[in-house]
Structures are given as C-alpha cells and as structure tokens.
C-alpha cells in the first residue's frame, strides 16, 4: 500500500513538473512575444500553468478549479482569435485539453489532499465545452465556400473545339487556347466513383546521381488518333498505344545533367500536321515521313523534331532533326537556358522560349522568344525582351541580351488573331533590381502578346511593376469568349498570377475587362534599389483580403505556435509586396505563388473556371556582400541547382535566402489551409465554391489522412461530365470533384507524387483519365516513373 501511495505521489509530481516546465516556457516566450507587440495571452497561460503546477505539487484540489477556468478562458480566446476553424483551434487547445483530461483521471485527482468533487466537475464541464467547440468546428469550416452553380450553368454542349476530335487531347492544354477542358462525358458525376485503373506504363526514368534536387515529373501527355505522346524528366520521349498503354516507340536525346541545372523537367511535347498529312488521312494513304511530327524541348537547350508514327528524326528539320537553341546566346552552357514547356506550334511557326537560372548572377543567358519555321527549323524572327529593339536578330558574333526577362511557362495561341500570349518573368537576379535598365523592366512580369507570323509586339500588360518578389506570370494563360453584362461576346484572356490575382484582359488589345486598379503598396526598398508606389490588384482574385497577423500563425502545439508568432513579429511584413530586406521579409503570397504552372481549367460553354490556388508564405532575407559572400563566383564555380536556400545573386550588392516560412519542427507557420480547389462563375467573376484539398498522409510522421488543404504543383482539368480532375497535392492522390458544387466524388491512391496536370481522351469508345505519377524532388514527394490511366470497368 505504501508503494502504491509513493508511486501515486511520484506521478502527481511528474504531472506538476510538466505543468511547471510548460508554464515557464509559455511565460518566457510570452514575455518575448509581448516585447514584439504580440498577443499577451501566452504570459497569462504561462502564469496559469505555473500556479496549476504549484497547486498540484501541494496536492491541492483547487488545481483542478484553476485549470478549469484557464481551459475555458483559452477556449474563448481561441474562438475570438480564429472562430470555428478546427485546424486553427487545434494548436491552441490540443495540449491544454489533453493535460486537463489527464488530471481528471482517478490516478491523479484521487491523490490530491482533498477529493475536490466540485473542482473536478468544473474541469470536466470545461473539457466538455472545449470538446463541443472542436466537434462543431469539424463540420463548420469558415474557410470553405459552399455554393452551387445555378441550373442554367450546369448544362454544357459536347462540341469539338476548333475542329479537334472530341476524343483527342492534341496540345498541353488540350487546345492551344489553354482551356484544359474536354467535351467528353462518358465519365460523369454519376459514375466517376466507379473508375478503376485501366493500365500502367513505367518509363524507367528515375533520378540519377548527377541530377539536381529539382528533378520533377510535370508532364501532361498529348493524344492524337490512337497514340499518346509524353516526355519524362530527362526528356525521353514515348509513344504509347492510347487504349492499352503499350509502348510503340521511344526516343532518348541523351541529356547529360549535372547539379548546376536548376531544373530537370519536361511539361510536355507539341504536335504538328502538314496539309499533306491531312490529305493523306482523308484519302486513307500513308503520310510522308514527318508530315506528322512531335516536337520535344530538351533542357540542354535543344529542340528535336520526330516523325509521330515511327519516332525517327526529321532529316530536313535543322541539323538532322535537332535545333540548337543556344545560337547567339550569351553565356551558353547546358542547363543555363532550359526550354521546360512545350512550344506553341501553328501552321508554319514554332514559338519557343525557355527558363534561365534564377538568382544566380548577372551573367545569364537571354530570355529571348523566337519563331522558327516548323518544317525547316529556320529562324524566322526573335523578340528579345531586354533589347532596345526587341526584333533585332543578332548577326555573326552578336548576341542576344543577357539576363533579359524569360518565359518559362506554357504559352497560348489565338489562331483567328494570329497572336501568341506568353507569360513573362522578371530579369534575374530576381530579389534586388537596382541595376535594371528601363529595357529590362519594359516587358517583365506580365503577359506579352506577339504576332506569330512576324514576331512584332501586339501589346504587353504588366502584372507586377519592378518585381522584387519573383512574381513571374507562372501559368499558361487561358483564352475564352465571355458574355458580358450587356450580352456581348468579349474575347478575353485569363492570366493567373502568383499574387493570387487572375487578370482578365481583352486579348485583342490587352485592356482590362475586369478592373485591376493600381493600389498603393508598402515602401522602403533595400539600399540602392527602388520600388513602384502602386501595383495592379484584379477584382477577380484569390489573394487574401486581409494581411496576415499573429492570429494566423500555426504549429502542431501551443509551443511551436508561440515560436511562429515570435518569428512572425521579427520579420518585416506590411502585406503583399513588402520589400525585401536584410531584416528578413515575409513574402505572402509566397515565391511559390498562389498559382503555378498548372493554370486554370475553363469550360467556355458554361463560362465556369476551376482553379487550385494555394497559400504558403516564404521568407526572403537579403545578405550584404562581405566575408564568405563575394560579389563574383569563385574560380570554377558554376550555377546552382536549387530555388530555395542561399541564392548568390552574383553581380549585385546582395545575396538572398529564400525558404518557406516553417516552424523549428518543420511545420508551416501559417495556419492551414495551404491549398484549395475552387470554381468561379465567369459571368459574375464570383467564387461559387472553395474547398480544402489534400491531406497530411504523406507529409507527417504518421500516415494520418487529415484533410487540411495542402500545397500543390500541377493544375485541374474539367469535362462535360461535370467532373474536375486534379492530382498536384503533396499527398499522392488523383481526385475527382463535382464542378457544380465541389463535392468530392472519387480518389485514387498514386504510387508516387502526382505533381502534374492530368488529361482525358477517348480510345475505341472508352474514355480514359491519365496522370503522370513521378513526384517532385524539391517539393519532397515520392519519386517514381508511372503513367497511369483510369476508366470505367464496363465502358466499351
């Protein structure tokens, strides 16, 4: 009996010690936070825990009463700060709730000096109140929007677009207008839950020792006739039978990588048919070699043209099927200039651009955009975004302008207007711009419209002025004809931006259709730099309507949430476009952007867009030149393979560190959600519904399927079957949602990360949905080499 009493006494002392240590941590951290003008709650919490610990140590039942008051007060405080948001409430209440539950258990409270039935009852009542609040919050998410498209918006005609057969997907965005919409409806919102894996193809292309961290499988296959074409991260090209997934042919460009490559990726390939091929198809005869061709961009700065049926190189194209994109390029080297997105291909012209290494130096290749003859590979025109005369083509030893703004995301094309729409980034280095010339700023961070035949400027719209935040236009624009309030059809282009804005422009003129007023933004640039006093804010937007505050900070527990609040108040942050600083600047929306290369999906019949915005802050910190931080790279130093961590920015006065805003435990410091799927009524430009998407199953130490809303890389597609498909999230799933109301309809577990945009097509009367599951190196998802097709089991 004495032994049991001694053990019980030790248990109470250990409980008191935990409360004391927690109280001391919260008190010290709370005082630190208060000195930074943060919430005083943590000081109160620390004192409450310390007094509770003292009373427990003295074996006083009043410890339970004090803790009941503290728990009830914390619950009310949490509701005041974040409302009925379950995942925001959790770190405020989890440890406190479970500790309160612990001290009500018999082997604790029975060994207090007095049984304290009233005190225990009070604590049980407080625990019940907290539990009711949490249960209510599970079913009442204030971040979600639960609207439904009206009846007249839920009918969609299954008409082919621009003569494209309904069952094909012949371009990256299905159409060169970038709609990512299919008129197929065999798979629909009534039967999508029956989808089963139809076939799987393994490319065999995996990460090697010479690759950088940013090895990514972002491909969206294309489908023409009975063949599917896709590229792998190392730009191996495969042609598969669309019905079975069986390999027909492959081509390996023998890409040789090294860690200086910033990317090793291929988002897709392009397809072209000559008039002779169309005539041969109509007459039933075999087409001539390369009258149907696939165009493959390769990260070492080349473009290949191959016969679509056989995979043979096209001998009349450039140098036996291989076009050198490094010609007249400043600072040419493999991996310095990387075409990562499929080019636009018209009847006569290939329009291609590429990425350059971000934030490395002032000695980078040019961001020039070029037009080549689709048959011969001959250079037809150039548009050099940093040149005084952008259409000048260098002769002899002349070079294009180094470090000029580049276009790395897919472009879109309007055949009627003969205009190509190119998303443009910023001149590198990105995070300090005091050395930029007017020419470097003129076509930076916006949408560029060029005449495809001549390469002449049609118009340019800038989405960020003097961009210091790497706010490239990151996604393929989407073209659509929208009915305005007066019943008139307006040809528009939708431009998703990293800022969360979707700019809506008349694609003939570049004038705004949805207002985007210039809005004052924070000032106070770094030494030697300058700022624009205003930035355009579109009225169609997913950007946060309010700036972040300490209330928005998060963690797994109260302890790391407190650290995140301290870190937040130590950073410079005055809302969007807070300037980079040596202090450290919170960038939100972050460098990853609210929109990335996946773009949006637009059903032009229903005039509905499906989007997947995300919200993950980053921290940038300028590093002045000094010991260990030279202004020029050392002897033999070459490139960087990362877009996070230390970025040297050689040639300007500052290097920079770029990292997600994470707690010491590695959790995001901003509360969830970090990712959503949503639908927009394009007639009213209103968000109809918005849902969290993605779980922490593949991100947390335990495989827990908690739906928190995860970061994403990849985009959605939608179909006439009233279904939107998307993978993209940091967990390994392909999902289907109702376009009408956002209801989750189906999901399939993937063997690797699905950081790609899916596509759908029909073969032999059966509709398939295909996703590349190959993962993403720097995003941290599982790597693989899978191409997976799903179909209805009874479809014929």
Image (spheres, helix red, strand yellow):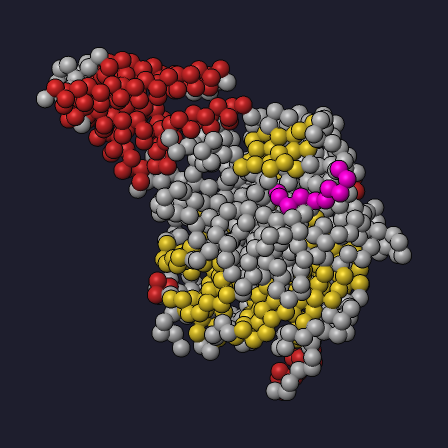
Q: In this view, does 239 lie above or below 217?
A: below
Residue 84 quadrant:
top left
Q: In this view, does 103 lie above or below 198?
A: above
Closer-to-camera residue (385/361): 361
Q: In which quarter of the image is the N terminus?
A: top left
Q: Where is residue 793 in the image (x, y as percent from the top left)?
A: 36, 71
Residue drawn where x is 80% and y is 57% of the image: 327
Closer-to-camera residue (273/233): 233
Q: In which quarter of the image is the C terminus?
A: bottom left
Residue 593 quadrant:
top right
Q: In this view, does 49 lie above or below 731?
A: above
Residue drawn where x is 49% and y is 67% of the image: 201
Residue drawn where x is 48% and y is 23% of the image: 566
In the picture provided, is 576 more to the left or to the right than 635? Answer: left
Residue drawn where x is 34% and y is 65% of the image: 194
Residue 532 quadrant:
top right
For the stretch drawn in magenta, the main secondary structure is: loop
Residue 492 visible at all: no
The residue furthest front is 3
The residue furthest right is 396
In the picture provided, is 37 more to the left or to the right than 528? Answer: left
Q: Does the magenta stretch include residue 157?
A: no
Q: Position of residue 588 (x, y in %)?
A: 55, 35
Q: Position of residue 514 (x, y in %)?
A: 58, 46
Region in magenta:
634-643
Q: Position of residue 658 (x, y in %)?
A: 60, 36
């Amino acid at each position: 009996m004495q032994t049991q009493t001694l053990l019980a006494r030790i248990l109470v002392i250990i409980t008191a010690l935990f409360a004391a240590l927690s109280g001391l941590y919260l008190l010290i951290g709370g005082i630190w936070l208060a000195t930074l003008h943060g919430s005083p709650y943590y000081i109160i919490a620390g004192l409450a825990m310390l007094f509770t610990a003292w009373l427990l140590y003295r074996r006083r039942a009043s410890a339970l009463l004090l803790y009941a008051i503290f728990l009830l007060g914390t619950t009310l405080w949490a509701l005041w700060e974040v409302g009925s948001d379950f995942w925001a409430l959790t770190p405020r209440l989890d440890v406190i709730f479970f500790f309160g539950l612990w001290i009500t258990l018999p082997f604790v409270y029975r060994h207090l000096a007095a049984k304290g039935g009233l005190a225990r009852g009070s604590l049980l009542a407080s625990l019940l109140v907290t539990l009711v609040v949490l249960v209510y919050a599970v079913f009442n998410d204030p971040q979600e929007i639960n609207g439904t498209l009206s009846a007249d918006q839920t009918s969609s005609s299954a008409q082919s677009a621009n003569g494209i057969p309904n069952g094909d997907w012949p371009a990256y965005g299905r159409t060169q207008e970038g709609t990512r919409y299919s008129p197929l409806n065999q798979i629909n919102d009534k039967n999508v839950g029956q989808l089963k894996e139809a076939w799987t193809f393994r490319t065999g292309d995996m990460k090697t020792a010479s690759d950088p961290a940013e090895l990514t499988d972002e491909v969206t296959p294309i489908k023409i006739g009975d063949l599917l074409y896709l590229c792998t991260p190392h730009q191996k090209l495969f042609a598969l039978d669309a019905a079975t997934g069986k390999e027909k042919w492959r081509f390996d460009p023998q890409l040789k990588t090294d860690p200086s490559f910033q990317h090793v990726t291929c988002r897709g390939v392009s397809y072209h048919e000559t008039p002779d091929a169309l005539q041969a198809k109509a007459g039933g005869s075999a087409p001539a070699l390369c009258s149907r061709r696939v165009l493959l961009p390769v990260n070492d700065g080349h473009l290949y043209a191959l016969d679509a049926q056989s995979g043979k190189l096209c001998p009349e194209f450039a140098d036996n099927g291989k076009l050198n994109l490094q010609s007249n390029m400043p600072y040419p080297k493999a991996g310095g200039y990387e075409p990562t997105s499929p080019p636009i291909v018209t009847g006569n012209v290939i329009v291609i651009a590429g990425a350059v290494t971000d934030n490395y130096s002032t000695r980078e290749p040019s961001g020039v955009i070029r037009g080549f003859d689709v048959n011969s590979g001959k250079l037809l025109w150039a548009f050099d975004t940093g040149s005084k005369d952008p259409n000048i083509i260098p002769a002899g030893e002349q070079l294009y302008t180094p470090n000029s703004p580049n276009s790395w995301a897919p472009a879109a094309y309007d055949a009627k207007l003969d205009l190509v729409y190119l998303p443009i980034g910023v001149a590198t280095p990105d995070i300090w711009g005091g050395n930029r010339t007017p020419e470097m700023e003129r076509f930076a961070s916006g949408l560029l419209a060029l005449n495809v035949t001549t390469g002449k400027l049609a118009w340019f719209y800038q989405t960020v002025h003097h961009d210091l935040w790497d706010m490239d236009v990151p996604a393929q624009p989407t073209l659509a004809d929208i009915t305005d309030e007066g019943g008139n059809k307006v040809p528009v282009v939708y431009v998703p931006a990293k800022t969360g804005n979707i700019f809506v422009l008349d694609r003939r003129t570049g004038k705004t259709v949805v207002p985007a007023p210039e809005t004052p933004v924070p000032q106070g640039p770094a030494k030697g730099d300058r700022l624009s006093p205003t930035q355009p804010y579109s009225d169609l937007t997913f950007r946060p309507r309010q700036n972040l505050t300490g209330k928005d900070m998060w963690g797994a527990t109260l302890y790391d949430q407190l650290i995140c609040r301290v870190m937040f108040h130590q950073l410079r942050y005055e809302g969007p476009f807070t300037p980079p600083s040596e202090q450290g600047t919170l960038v939100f929306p972050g460098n990853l952007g609210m929109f990335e290369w996946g773009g949006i999906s637009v059903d032009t019949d229903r005039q509905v867009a499906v989007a997947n915005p995300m919200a993950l802050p980053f921290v940038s910190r300028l590093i002045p030149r000094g010991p260990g931080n030279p202004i020029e790279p050392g002897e033999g130093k070459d490139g960087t393979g990362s877009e996070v961590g230390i970025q040297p920015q050689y040639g300007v006065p500052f290097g920079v560190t770029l990292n997600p805003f994470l707690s010491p435990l590695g959790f995001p410091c901003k509360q969830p959600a970090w990712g959503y799927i949503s639908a927009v009524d394009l007639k009213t430009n209103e968000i109809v519904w918005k849902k969290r998407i993605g779980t922490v199953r593949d991100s947390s130490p335990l495989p827990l399927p908690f739906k928190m809303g995860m970061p994403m890389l990849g985009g959605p597609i939608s179909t006439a079957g009233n279904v939107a498909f998307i993978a993209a999230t940091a967990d390994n799933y392909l999902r289907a949602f109702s376009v009408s109301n956002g209801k989750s309809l189906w999901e399939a577990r993937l063997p690797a990360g699905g950081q790609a945009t899916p596509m759908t097509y029909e073969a032999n009367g059966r509709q398939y949905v295909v996703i590349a599951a190959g993962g993403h190196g720097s995003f941290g998802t599982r790597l693989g080499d899978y191409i997976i097709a799903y179909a209805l089991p009874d479809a014929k």
